C-alpha cells in the first residue's frame, strides 16, 4: 500500500498521546488499524500524524465490575471478546455479535472501542452498545467524560470526540434483572459488512421485560437506535403481539438505501424478521434452561 | 526389473507439489519481488468516469513533485503511434486515452517516479477536465436508436454493434421446432465476473540501449505470444526481446492479454533508459483487466413428449465493453459457445450471437472458461432443467434419454464439434447414487409439508479442452500447437522446458511425472522450467485447460524421442541389434535374456562418453505437438440446498462431483483443480459478480464488493472419478483445469430453482443473492440481475 506521507508516533502513556493529538492538526489515533489503514491505502484518509496507542499499557482488558457494569479497554481486540467466557456469562448480546464482526484475521487486530469510534453505519459493535445503553469514556487534557453511544456517533464516520480526546473505554451498564438478547447479521460472506443486522438486548425479571434496547446496522446513514421498537417490549412478557409490534417499529425505524446487496424493502423486511427471530431464539434457549 | 511407477513419481502418483516448497516458505519469486538497479516506478491515472470527452490534461503539478521523472499522456503515446494497440480479436484498444474515456478505470496518464509513493502522489496531482457523456452499461442501452456512439474513433462504425455471428443449421432447426410436441423457453443473463488472481498484473521493462535488448518481467500466462506481439507493435526485432514470466500468483485467464500498463512501461523504459516497474493494485486489476462472461440468452428447446430433444435454438448477446479485446484463438467470434449441448444426442441446433460495445472494461473471455464454454454449459444445463420441468419429467431421467451413448463415439455435436470418448450415463449414475437421489426427492417432499424448501440440481456436461488443432485455432495467425524440450544430463538427471506457463496448476510436478512415466527417470530427478522466452521453446501458453492436452502431450513425445535414441545406445552397450532390445520402465534389456540390460541412466552416461560410431553425442531433443482434436472430459455435478424462505438465504447441503478427465497424471492435483473450480462455481452462483450503476460506476472494484469465498462459507465437496482414456492423447489424458468452474454453477442454481419450483419461478440470474431469491419467492416471478443495479 502506498498512502500519502504521514508521521508516526507511538507514545507509552495516555497523557502523552493526548498531548500529541492536541499539538498536531490532522492527527489520528491508530488502534487496531483495521479501518484506518485501509482508508489510508485508498487515500480516503490522509492524516498528517498517526498516534499509535498500542504501546500504552493496561488497556487490553475487558471485565465485569462489582457494580454490575462491564468495561472494555481501548486495546481489547475483537478476538479477545470472541474467546471470552466472562463475556458470554454477562453480556449475551456482545457474545453473540463477537464471532460475526469482520473475519478471523481482522478480529485479531481490530478493537472494540476503535470500531465504535470509527462510527461506520455498518459497524456491529456500536449497534450493540446502543441496544445495551452503553457509553464511551473519553479522556482529554481536562480529564474524563462519559458519553452514551447513542449520542456519541454524530453522523456517518463522525463522533463527538474532540480533536484531543481519546476513547479509553466502553462501558455497559448493570442489567436490570437477567440480561439476555442476541445478534443476527445478514452477510454475503464472512468478513462482509452487514446487508442488515439487528442487536436486541433484553433485561428480564420474572418473565417480564424490565429494559430493552434495539440497535440496527446497515439500514441508515448511521447506527440506528430503534428506541420505540424497544419500548414496545418493555413491560411485556414477550407475547406475540408485543414482539410483532417491536418488529414492525424496528422496520419503520430503519431507513435503508437500495443497492446491490438488496432493495430498501428487502432490508426493512430483514430487520423485522431478525427482531422476531432473535426474540424467538431467546425464548427457545430459556425454555431449554427451565 | 521394471521400476515401480508410483514409487518413482510416475503416472498416477499423488506426488506432493514440488513448487509448494518455495511457496509455503515465502520464497516464490513474483514480478514484484524482482528489483533491478536504478529501477523507477510507474503508476497509472485511471478515469473516474465511464464515458467522457477529455477536454484537457494538466500535468504541471505532477511534474513539480520532486522525484517525478515523467508523466505520460495519450498525446505522447500518439506521437509514437502507440496511443492505440491491436487486440487479439482484430479490434483496437486505447493504451492511454486521447479523445475520450470509454469505461471507468480506463488508463489516462502514467507517472514514472523514483518510488511508488511519489508515483501515486504524481497521479493525484494531475488535473483532467472531462466533459461527461451518457454511459451505456448494458446491450439494450447500447442498441437503442438514440444511443451515443462509443467507438467514434473507428471509421465505418455507425452504431454500438461489433458483430453479428451465427452457427448451426437454421432451416432444419426451424423445422424441428415446427414439428415439436412442446417448446421450452428460458431467458437469462450470465453476469460479468472477474478472474481476480490474488497477484494483480505487473511488469518491469528494462531496455538496454547498449545492447538494444528489451527484457520484460511480466505477469503473463503466454510469454511467447507477448514476445511476438511486442515485436509487431513496438518494432523491436523478436530476438532482441526477452519476456520472463516468473512465478505467477494465479491467472485464470486474466494474464493472457497484453494490457496498456505493459506497453506504457516498455515505452517509458525506452525513453528513460531505466528499468520501469509497474505493479497494478487490486482495484486497477478488477476494473480494467480481462473479465469473464456478461452474456444474455434467449434459449429454446424443441421437445418430443417422451423427453427427446429435437432441436436447440440459442439467441445470445454478448457485452464486450469498450474495446473488443477478447483473448481467444478460435475462428469463431464468440469463442466456443457453440460447444453447448455436446454431451446430448440432438439432431440440429442454431445459435446467433450479437456482440456489442458498452462503457465497461474490455477483455472478455477470461476466468477459467475455455473461451466461453462456461456460458455454453451453464445455459445448456439451465435450459435442460427448465425443459424437464416443463415436460413434468424427472431431471435425471430427462438427461438419460438425451445423453450420448458410450458406443456412439466419436460423435458429432449439434453444432458440429467431434467429441472423442466418454461414459456419460455411468458418471450420472455414480453421482445419483452418491447423493442418494431417490431418497432426497422423498425428503424434499416431506420437508415441503413443513414449509422447508429443499432442492436438488444436476449439471452434466462435456467440454472442449486443449486448443487446439491448428486448422481452427490460431492467435494472430500463429497456430495453437505447443512444445517441450528435454535435456538428459550424463548422470541421468534432466531439465525439461515447455512453452506453457504454470500459474498454480503444478506443471513443475506433473510434467516430471510424464517424463518419469515415459523414461523411468524418477520425477525428483527432473527439473521443470517455464516462462523465459530466451530459454523455453516456443509455446502458446497456459489457459483454457490446454496444457496437459497439448504441452503435456509434447512432453510425452519428446520423452519418446529420447527413449528412441537411448534404445540405440543400449543396443550398442549390450552389443546386440536394435530389434533385439526390449523396454521396461527405466531399463532396456536383451529380448530373451531379461537380466542382460542397461538402465536409462547408463544410457545417458554413454551418450556423453561412449556413443556408437556415427551417432551425435548428447541426449536432448524437442517436440512440437499439434493436437488432432480437442479433448472432451465429462462431468456430473449434483448439489442439494436448503432455502430460507424468510430471508432468501440458501445453504448447500451436499455437492457431489463425478469427473472423467481421462487418465489422471497426479490425482491429488486433479482433485485440487476440481475443488478450486467448484469453489469458484459456488462463488458465481452465490455471491460473485461485477455490476454497474446507472452512471457507469463499477460495483465490484475491490474485495469488499467483489466477493471471493473463504474456507468459512465454501461447502464441502465429495469427489468421484471415472476414467475414459482420451483416444488421441499420448497418455490418454484430458483437460481438467476448468471443468468444475464450467459445469459447477448450474448444479447450484438448478438446486435452488428446484427448491422454488412449486412457487412457479423459472429463473433467477446469478448470483443468487438472498434478496433476489426472496423477491422471487414473494412475487412468484423470475428475477433478472443485469446492470444497471437497481437502487430501490
Ligand atoms: C476486511 C474487513 C472486514 C471488516 N468487517 C467488519 C464487520 O463486518 N463489522 C464491523 O463492525 N467491522 C468490520 N471491520 C472493521 C473492523 O471491525 C475494525 O477493527 C474497526 O472498525 C476499527 O477498529 P480498529 O481498532 O481497527 O480501529 P482503527 O482502524 O485503528 O481506527 C478506526 C478509527 O477510529 C479511531 N480510533 C480508534 N481507536 C480510537 C480511540 N481509542 N480513541 C479515539 N479514536 C479512535 C481512529 O482514529 C480511526 O479514525 C472490517 C475490517 C476489515 C479490514
Image (spheres, rainbow, N blue to C red):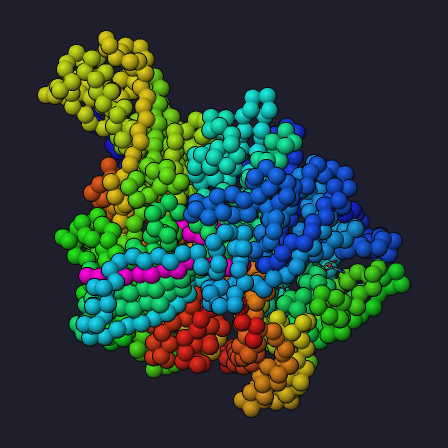
Q: Can residue B478 be seen in this view?
A: yes
Is B361 within the magenta? yes
Q: Nearer the viewer, residue B784 or B677?
A: B784
Is B646 within the magenta? no
B118 vs B53, left or right, is right
Residue B523 placed where, x, y %?
34, 31
Q: Could you tell me which residue is drawn at 56 percent across and 87 percent down?
A: A244
Q: Can residue B715 be seen in this view?
A: no
* Residue at the extreme front: B156
Q: Give the range drawn in magenta.
A: B347-368
* Residue at the extreme right: A142
Q: Nearer the viewer, residue B283 or B125?
A: B125
* Residue at the extreme top: B613
**How many circles with numbers are drawn on the protein?**
0
Q: Nearer the viewer, residue B582 or B211?
A: B211
Residue B746 image-quadrant placement = bottom left
Residue B11 position (above or below residue B378):
above
Q: Could you tell me which residue is drawn at 30 percent across and 74 percent down?
A: B443
Q: Could you tell me which residue is drawn at 51 percent across and 32 percent down?
A: B235
Residue A102 image-quadrant placement = bottom right
Residue B168 position (above or below residue A246):
above
Q: Could you tell me which residue is drawn at 73 percent across and 70 percent down?
A: A155
A132 vs A160, left or right, is left
Quarter of image, ligand 1 = bottom right
B12 vs B572, left or right, is right
Residue B54 placed where, x, y %?
65, 54
Residue A40 placed where, x, y %?
69, 53
Residue B528 placed where, x, y %?
39, 31
Residue B557 position (above or below residue B360):
above
* Residue at the extreme bottom: A241
Amino acid at each position: 500500500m502506498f498512502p500519502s506521507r504521514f508521521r508516526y508516533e507511538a507514545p507509552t502513556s495516555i497523557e502523552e498521546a493526548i498531548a500529541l493529538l492536541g499539538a498536531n492538526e490532522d492527527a489520528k489515533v491508530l488502534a487496531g488499524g483495521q479501518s484506518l489503514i485501509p482508508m489510508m491505502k485508498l487515500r480516503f484518509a490522509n492524516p498528517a500524524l498517526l498516534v499509535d496507542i498500542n504501546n500504552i499499557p493496561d488497556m487490553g482488558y475487558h471485565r465485569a465490575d462489582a457494580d454490575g457494569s462491564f468495561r472494555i479497554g481501548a486495546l481489547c481486540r475483537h478476538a479477545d471478546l470472541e474467546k471470552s467466557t466472562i463475556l458470554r456469562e454477562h453480556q449475551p448480546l456482545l457474545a453473540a455479535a463477537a464471532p460475526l464482526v469482520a473475519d478471523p484475521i481482522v478480529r485479531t487486530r481490530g478493537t472494540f472501542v476503535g470500531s465504535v469510534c470509527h462510527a461506520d453505519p455498518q459497524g456491529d459493535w456500536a449497534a450493540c452498545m446502543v441496544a445495551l445503553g452503553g457509553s464511551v469514556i473519553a479522556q482529554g487534557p481536562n480529564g474524563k467524560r462519559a458519553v452514551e453511544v447513542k449520542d456519541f456517533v454524530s453522523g456517518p464516520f463522525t463522533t463527538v470526540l474532540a480533536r484531543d480526546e481519546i476513547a479509553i473505554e466502553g462501558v455497559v451498564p448493570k442489567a436490570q434483572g437477567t440480561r439476555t438478547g442476541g445478534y443476527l447479521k445478514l452477510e454475503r460472506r464472512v468478513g462482509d459488512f452487514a446487508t442488515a443486522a439487528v442487536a436486541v438486548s433484553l433485561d428480564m425479571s420474572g418473565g417480564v421485560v424490565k429494559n430493552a434496547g434495539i440497535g440496527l446496522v446497515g439500514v441508515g446513514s448511521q447506527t440506528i437506535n430503534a428506541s420505540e421498537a424497544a419500548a414496545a417490549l418493555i413491560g411485556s412478557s414477550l407475547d406475540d403481539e408485543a414482539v410483532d409490534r417491536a418488529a414492525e417499529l424496528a422496520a419503520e425505524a430503519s431507513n435503508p438505501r437500495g443497492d446491490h446487496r438488496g432493495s430498501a424493502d428487502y432490508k426493512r423486511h430483514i430487520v423485522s424478521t431478525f427482531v422476531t427471530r432473535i426474540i424467538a431464539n431467546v425464548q427457545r434457549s430459556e425454555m431449554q434452561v427451565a | 526389473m521394471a521400476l515401480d511407477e508410483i514409487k518413482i513419481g510416475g503416472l498416477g502418483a499423488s506426488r506432493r507439489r514440488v513448487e509448494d516448497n518455495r511457496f509455503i516458505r515465502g520464497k516464490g519469486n513474483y514480478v514484484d519481488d524482482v528489483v533491478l538497479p536504478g529501477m523507477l516506478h510507474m503508476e497509472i491515472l485511471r478515469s473516474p468516469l465511464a464515458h467522457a470527452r477529455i477536454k484537457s490534461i494538466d500535468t504541471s503539478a505532477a511534474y513539480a513533485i520532486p522525484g517525478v521523472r515523467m508523466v505520460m499522456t495519450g498525446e505522447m503515446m500518439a506521437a509514437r503511434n502507440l496511443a492505440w494497440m491491436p487486440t487479439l480479436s482484430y479490434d483496437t484498444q486505447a493504451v492511454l486515452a486521447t479523445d475520450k474515456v470509454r469505461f471507468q478505470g480506463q488508463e489516462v496518464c502514467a507517472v514514472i517516479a523514483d518510488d511508488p509513493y511519489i508515483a501515486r502522489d504524481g497521479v493525484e496531482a494531475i488535473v483532467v477536465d472531462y466533459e461527461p457523456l451518457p454511459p451505456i452499461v448494458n446491450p439494450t442501452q447500447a442498441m437503442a436508436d438514440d444511443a451515443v456512439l462509443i467507438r467514434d474513433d473507428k471509421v465505418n462504425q455507425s452504431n454500438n454493434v461489433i458483430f453479428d455471428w451465427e452457427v448451426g443449421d437454421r432451416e432444419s432447426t426451424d423445422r424441428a421446432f415446427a414439428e415439436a410436441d412442446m417448446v421450452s423457453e428460458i431467458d437469462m443473463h450470465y453476469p460479468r465476473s472477474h478472474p481476480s488472481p490474488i497477484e494483480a498484473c505487473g511488469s518491469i521493462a528494462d531496455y538496454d540501449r547498449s545492447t538494444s535488448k528489451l527484457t520484460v518481467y511480466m505477469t503473463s500466462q503466454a510469454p511467447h505470444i507477448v514476445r511476438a506481439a511486442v515485436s509487431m507493435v513496438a518494432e523491436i526485432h523478436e530476438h532482441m526481446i526477452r519476456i520472463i514470466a516468473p512465478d505467477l500468483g494465479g491467472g485464470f485467464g486474466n494474464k493472457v492479454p497484453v494490457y496498456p500498463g505493459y506497453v506504457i512501461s516498455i515505452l517509458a523504459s525506452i525513453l528513460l533508459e531505466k528499468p520501469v516497474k509497474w505493479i497494478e493494485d487490486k482495484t486497477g486489476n478488477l476494473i480494467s483487466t480481462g473479465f469473464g462472461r456478461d452474456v444474455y440468452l434467449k434459449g429454446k428447446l424443441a421437445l418430443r413428449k417422451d423427453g427427446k430433444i429435437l432441436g436447440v435454438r440459442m439467441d445470445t448477446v454478448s457485452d464486450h465493453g469498450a474495446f473488443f479485446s477478447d483473448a481467444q484463438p478460435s475462428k469463431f467470434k464468440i469463442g466456443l459457445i457453440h460447444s453447448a449441448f455436446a454431451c446430448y444426442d440432438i439432431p440440429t441446433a442454431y445459435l446467433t450471437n450479437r456482440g456489442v460495445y458498452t462503457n465497461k472494461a474490455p477483455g472478455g473471455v477470461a476466468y477459467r472458461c475455455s473461451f466461453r464454454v462456461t456460458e455454453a454449459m451453464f445455459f445448456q444445463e439451465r435450459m435442460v432443467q427448465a425443459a424437464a420441468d416443463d415436460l413434468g419429467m424427472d431431471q435425471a431421467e430427462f438427461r438419460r434419454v438425451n445423453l450420448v451413448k458410450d458406443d456412439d463415439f466419436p460423435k458429432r455435436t449439434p453444432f458440429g464439434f467431434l467429441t472423442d470418448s466418454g461414459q456419460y450415463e455411468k458418471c450420472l449414475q455414480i453421482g445419483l447414487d452418491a447423493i442418494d437421489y431417490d431418497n432426497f426427492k422423498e425428503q424434499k417432499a416431506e420437508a415441503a409439508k413443513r414449509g422447508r424448501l429443499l432442492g436438488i440440481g444436476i449439471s452434466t456436461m462435456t467440454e472442449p479442452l486443449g486448443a487446439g488443432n491448428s486448422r481452427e485455432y490460431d492467435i494472430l495467425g500463429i497456430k495453437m500447437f505447443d512444445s517441450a524440450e528435454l535435456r538428459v544430463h550424463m548422470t541421468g538427471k534432466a531439465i525439461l522446458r515447455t512453452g506453457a506457463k504454470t500459474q498454480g496448476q503444478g506443471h513443475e510436478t506433473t510434467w516430471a511425472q510424464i517424463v518419469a512415466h515415459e523414461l523411468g527417470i524418477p520425477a525428483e530427478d527432473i527439473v521443470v522450467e517455464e516462462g523465459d522466452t530466451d530459454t523455453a521453446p516456443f509455446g502458446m501458453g497456459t489457459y483454457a485447460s490446454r496444457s496437459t492436452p497439448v504441452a503435456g502431450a509434447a512432453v510425452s513425445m519428446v520423452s519418446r524421442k529420447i527413449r528412441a535414441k537411448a534404445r540405440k545406445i543400449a543396443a550398442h552397450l549390450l552389443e546386440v541389434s536394435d530389434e533385439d532390445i526390449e523396454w521396461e520402465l527405466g531399463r532396456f534389456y536383451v529380448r530373451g535374456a531379461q537380466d542382460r540390460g542397461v538402465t536409462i541412466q547408463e544410457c545417458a552416461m554413454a551418450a556423453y562418453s561412449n556413443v556408437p560410431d556415427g551417432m551425435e553425442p548428447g541426449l536432448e531433443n524437442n517436440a512440437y505437438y499439434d493436437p488432432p482434436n480437442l479433448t472432451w472430459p465429462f462431468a456430473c455435478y449434483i448439489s442439494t440446498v436448503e432455502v430460507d424462505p424468510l430471508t432468501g438465504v440458501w445453504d448447500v447441503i451436499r455437492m457431489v462431483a463425478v469427473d472423467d478427465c481421462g487418465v489422471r497424471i497426479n490425482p491429488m492435483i486433479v482433485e485440487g483443480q476440481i475443488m478450486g473450480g467448484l469453489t469458484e462455481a459456488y462463488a458465481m452462483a452465490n455471491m460473485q459478480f461485477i455490476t454497474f450503476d446507472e452512471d457507469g460506476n463499477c460495483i465490484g472494484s475491490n474485495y469488499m464488493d467483489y466477493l471471493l469465498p473463504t474456507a468459512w462459507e465454501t461447502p464441502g465437496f465429495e469427489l468421484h472419478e471415472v476414467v475414459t482414456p482420451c483416444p488421441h492423447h499420448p497418455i490418454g489424458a484430458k483437460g481438467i483445469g476448468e471443468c468444475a468452474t464450467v459445469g459447477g454453477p448450474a448444479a447450484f442454481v438448478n438446486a435452488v430453482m428446484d427448491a422454488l419450483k412449486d412457487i412457479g419461478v423459472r429463473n433467477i440470474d446469478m448470483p443468487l443473492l438472498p434478496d433476489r431469491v426472496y423477491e422471487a419467492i414473494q412475487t412468484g416471478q423470475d428475477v433478472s440481475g443485469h446492470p444497471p443495479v437497481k437502487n430501490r
